[in-house]
Image (cartoon, grey):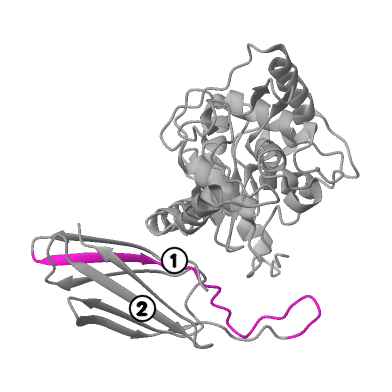
């Protein structure tokens, strides 16, 4: 089980800014270990963000995204106290969902 | 890297250098390149500051701190970091210090090993299993706890005391180690950290013999190293400096490591602690 994400969501005017820090190895599949064996690729493939049941962001990621990725985005709408849900799924089928309250 | 100078270029270059020397106010191209690289690294750090993955270590460390672990099934919440059992807030800004119960000057990492042994019943071998993360899935609990405890001192001014004779002695030993030169390269800490504007490749090195240098360096460790994908403790920083100097391996929690930490922490007194930070 992966470590929890750190999510911050703040609304200013009619726009909510969400900042997400995810804990993931994001192995590219290009690296070799000390024995010369290829380290298998292992990375987050899809990220979705929902607010009040509406998808506000859907992304497909690849191995070029850094380890422990940081994602920041804005969407129109949101009010203090609303919940924002972030879900990622990696290429091993592991997934993790965390939520944050808009402040 | 080698520089090749084409025939004829030599004189041209010479003329250019002469012109620079005569110009006086003109900045040498090499210096310009260096300062712009430093600026770019500073921008890079600023860009990363917002999403510092050190927060992931802090959160994990807080969990481990409160989790019942070890043969005695106890958490670390009763661990006395110098301000009383369970007080974490601001504790790191006063470490290292002398602990009467252990009759020894300890830095944070050594104190954590001590608490793991006395409160949780871990054997020394067990608590030392993974002191540093490997840059992969095998993460270090020690580095996570260090991240959590140090984050609780963010903004607190460094205040390391030397009133205790043992603490004062540790400081003096640390000072000696800092200025001691040895090893196959006849190196010492002071070789790289005794002057302004020294660097390794493009990395600026802090001058630890000045108050500002020591403050800036000490208050920004531990840090998340982007190039390693790991959060690194101060013990790791010293360990790797010793490796780079080709000194004998610095044993984790040894008196030598605590003495050096004491010397640098005390010299940083007065500056607000600002870590876990992020570094290239």
How many other residues sit within 10 Å of disc 2, few (<14), some (14-19) or many (≥20)? some
Q: Horizontal and vertical percent for residue B35?
A: 50, 49
| Figure check: B124 above or below A4 | above
Indicate the quadrant containing the C terminus of chain B: top left, top right, bottom left or bottom right: bottom right
Toward the left, the furthest residue is: A13
Q: Horizontal and vertical percent for residue B240?
A: 73, 49
How many other residues sit within 10 Å of disc 1, few (<14), some (14-19) or many (≥20)? some
Q: Are marks 1 and 2 on the same chain?
A: yes
Judging from the image, what secondary structure is the residue with disc 2 in? strand
The residue positioned 51% from the left and 83% from the top of the image is: A63
Question: On residue B273, which mark appears?
Answer: none
Q: Which residue is mark 1?
A: A4
Q: Chain of mark 1?
A: A
**Residue B66 appears in the rendering:** yes
Q: Marks 1/2: CA distance? A: 11 Å
Report the number of discs.
Answer: 2
Q: What range is drawn magenta here?
A: A14-37
Q: Chain of mark 2?
A: A
Q: Is residue A48 magenta?
A: no
- Left or right position of B105 against A20: right
Q: Main secondary structure of the magenta part?
A: loop
Toward the front, the furthest residue is: B72
Q: Horizontal and vertical percent for residue B254?
A: 79, 36
- Left or right position of B83 against A18: right
Q: Which residue is mark 2?
A: A87
Q: Horizontal and vertical percent for residue A70?
A: 40, 67
**Residue B31 appears in the rendering:** no
């Amino acid at each position: 089980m992966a470590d929890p994400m750190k999510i911050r969501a703040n609304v200013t005017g009619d726009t909510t800014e969400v900042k997400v820090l995810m804990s993931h190895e994001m192995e590219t599949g290009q690296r070799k270990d000390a024995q010369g064996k290829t380290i298998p690729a292992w990375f987050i493939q899809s990220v979705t963000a929902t607010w009040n049941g509406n998808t506000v962001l859907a992304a497909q990621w690849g191995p070029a995204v850094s380890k422990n990725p940081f994602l920041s985005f804005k969407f129109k709408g949101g009010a203090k106290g609303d919940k924002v849900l972030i879900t990622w799924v990696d290429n091993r089928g592991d997934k993790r969902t965390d939520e944050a309250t808009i402040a | 890297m080698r520089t090749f100078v084409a025939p004829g270029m030599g004189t041209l270059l010479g003329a250019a250098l002469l012109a620079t020397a005569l110009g006086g106010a003109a900045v040498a191209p090499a210096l310009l390149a260096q300062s712009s690289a430093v600026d770019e690294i500073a921008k890079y750090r600023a860009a990363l500051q917002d999403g510092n993955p050190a927060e992931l270590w802090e959160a994990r460390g807080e969990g481990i701190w409160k989790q019942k672990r070890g043969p005695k099934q106890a958490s670390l919440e009763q661990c006395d970091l110098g301000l009383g059992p369970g007080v974490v807030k601001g504790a790191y800004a006063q470490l290292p210090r002398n602990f009467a119960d252990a009759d020894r000057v300890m830095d944070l990492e050594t104190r954590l090993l001590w608490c793991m042994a006395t409160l949780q019943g871990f054997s020394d071998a067990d608590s030392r299993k993974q002191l540093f993360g490997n840059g992969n899935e095998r993460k270090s609990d020690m580095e996570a706890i260090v991240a959590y405890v140090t984050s609780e001192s963010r903004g607190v001014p460094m205040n390391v005391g030397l009133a205790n004779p043992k603490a004062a002695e540790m400081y003096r030993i640390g000072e000696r180690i800092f200025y001691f030169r040895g090893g196959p390269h006849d190196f010492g800490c002071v070789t790289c950290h005794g002057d302004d504007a020294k660097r390794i490749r493009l990395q600026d090195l802090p001058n630890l013999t000045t108050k500002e240098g020591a403050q800036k360096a000490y208050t920004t460790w531990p840090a998340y190293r982007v190039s390693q994908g790991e959060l690194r403790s101060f013990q790791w920083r010293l360990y790797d400096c010793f490796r780079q100097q080709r000194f004998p391996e610095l044993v984790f929690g040894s008196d030598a490591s605590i003495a050096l930490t004491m010397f640098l922490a005390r010299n940083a007194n007065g500056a607000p602690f600002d870590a876990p930070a992020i570094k290239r």
